[in-house]
Amino acid sequence: MPNKAYEILAENLATQGIDVEQVKAVLKQQHIETPSWGYANSGTRFKAFAWPGAATTTQQKLDDAAMVHKMTGIAPTVAVHIPWDRPKDDDYAGMCQYAESHGIRIGAVNPNVFQDDQYRLGSLGNPDSGVQEQALDHLLECCEIMTKVKSDVLSLWFADGTNYAGQDSLRGRKKRFEKALRLVYERLPANSRMLIEYKFFEPAFYSTDIPDWGTAYAWCLKLGPQAQVLVDLGHHAQGVNIEQIVAFLLDEGRLGGFHFNNRKYADDDLMVGSTNPYELFLIYNELVGAAQSDDQMARATAQNVAYMIDQCHNIEGKMIPMIYSVLNCQEAYAEALLVPRNRLTTAQAEGNIMEAHHLLNEAYRTDVRPLLAQVRTEIGVPADPIAVYRASGYEEKIRAERGLSATSGGFQ
Ligand code: RM4
Ligand code: MN
Ligand code: MN
């Protein structure tokens, strides 16, 4: 069926000098990774509400991720959390094959050094050298797992910090981290990367060992080129200009990846772009600007960013918000691709503030939905993924097969 709205939009964009075929080609290459833990039950610190049909096994999580990819066509990988996704008999090759037989691959490996009892005072930053060592061993084990599941990203987040002034030596903790991260860095598989994620508070509230992008960046510089910063959108104070952090890290070659979600919750609970689609657009605008620039470093860095969702939904279900989030990223990316870069550069050079601002906003305000429907049709996925998912019977099927399980993905 010809997409009338698309034809009108394409004509309109062509008169603005935009190469629509090129925009579509770029959109078809987009890749958003979904998290295995986002398909399982999760909760707030007060309550984990069980969701009917939520995944409890890694195979079920992979099934769900495969369904999200089938609906969207741009979510071909899934991040795993170890030990939440540790397979029986440590059969990682089997897990990898299971994913591949369902049309997806394993993406980032996320070690978990925050849930065992010994981590009460932290992991790598723990004052007890025995605990530091256990955490280090787990990280090194994850380097080996990367090879088994064909992953090239080790994604590191630490719950480490202190709750009371004087509880521990701040410099001491810094040194413990630097020493251990160096040992992990040396064991990274060839051609892989270590992404260091920061978070300004929680679960520690007096000090957090990696509180901000500056700390993560400083350590990446010390470690070497295989270490890059991971920007989790939820881990920022409300007023922080995230796109400026993105621009800085792109320019320095140290933006490694994203964890998409929404900072309104200060963590992983809300859909990316749900209350702040403009901000998501501005972030993509920096990425597209870098990818299209002739600055070698920024361009190469932008082309190698790992786009990952880090969301665990508590009250709104699992599959639809995940599909929705992938689509929100697609929409923001499409709008950013419509920014007339040359005209924007000219307006900026002339100090023409209103023209520059207007050009950006016009791209943002373009209704790209017909364009995305066209792209989806051309890659053979539903033009309206949410509607087709609702009608697919998948939700009813998993509810019937899996039922209601009290266990959570790891947040219990
Ligand atoms: C943390 C952080 C990590 C994620 C865990 C589950 O807040 O964002 O990336 O792996 O939650
Ligand atoms: Mn995260
Ligand atoms: Mn988080």
Image (spheres, helix red, strand yellow):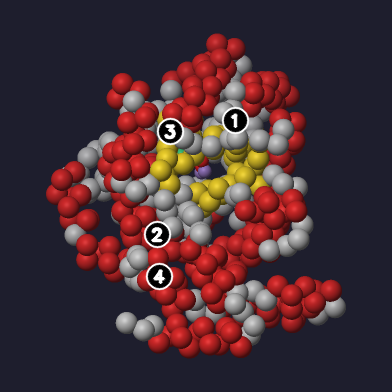
Q: Earlier in the sequence, mark 4 or mark 1?
A: 1
Neighbor class of circle 2 (other Cα within 10 Å; few <14, some 14-19, many 20+) is many
Do the residues under discs 4 and 3 have CB atoms within 8 angstroms? no
Q: Secondary structure at mark 4?
A: helix
Q: Is residue 149 left or right of residue 338?
A: left
Identify the residue at the far left of this view.
Answer: 400
Q: Earlier in the sequence, mark 1 or mark 3?
A: 3
Residue 378's place in the image compared with 248, above or below, is below
Neighbor class of circle 3 (other Cα within 10 Å; few <14, some 14-19, many 20+) is many
Which label number is shown at residue 190? Answer: 1
Q: Earlier in the sequence, mark 3 or mark 2?
A: 2
Disc 4 versus disc 1: distance between alpha carbons?
A: 36 Å
Please name the amino acid that badge 3 sits on.
Val
Q: Is residue 178 visible?
A: yes
Please name the amino acid that badge 4 sits on.
Glu
Q: Which of the two residues, 22 or 48, is positioned nearer the viewer here?
A: 22
Do the residues under discs 3 and 2 have CB atoms within 8 angstroms? no
The structure residue drawn at horizontal position 48% and vertical position 31%, both measured from the top left corner, is: 146
Q: Which residue is mark 2?
A: 73
Q: Which residue is mark 3?
A: 149
Q: Which residue is mark 4?
A: 378
Q: Earlier in the sequence, mark 2 or mark 4?
A: 2
Place residue 380 in its image quadrant. Answer: bottom left
Q: CB at mark 4 closer than 8 A to ligand 2? A: no
The structure residue drawn at horizontal position 67% and vertical position 50%, both measured from the top left corner, is: 301
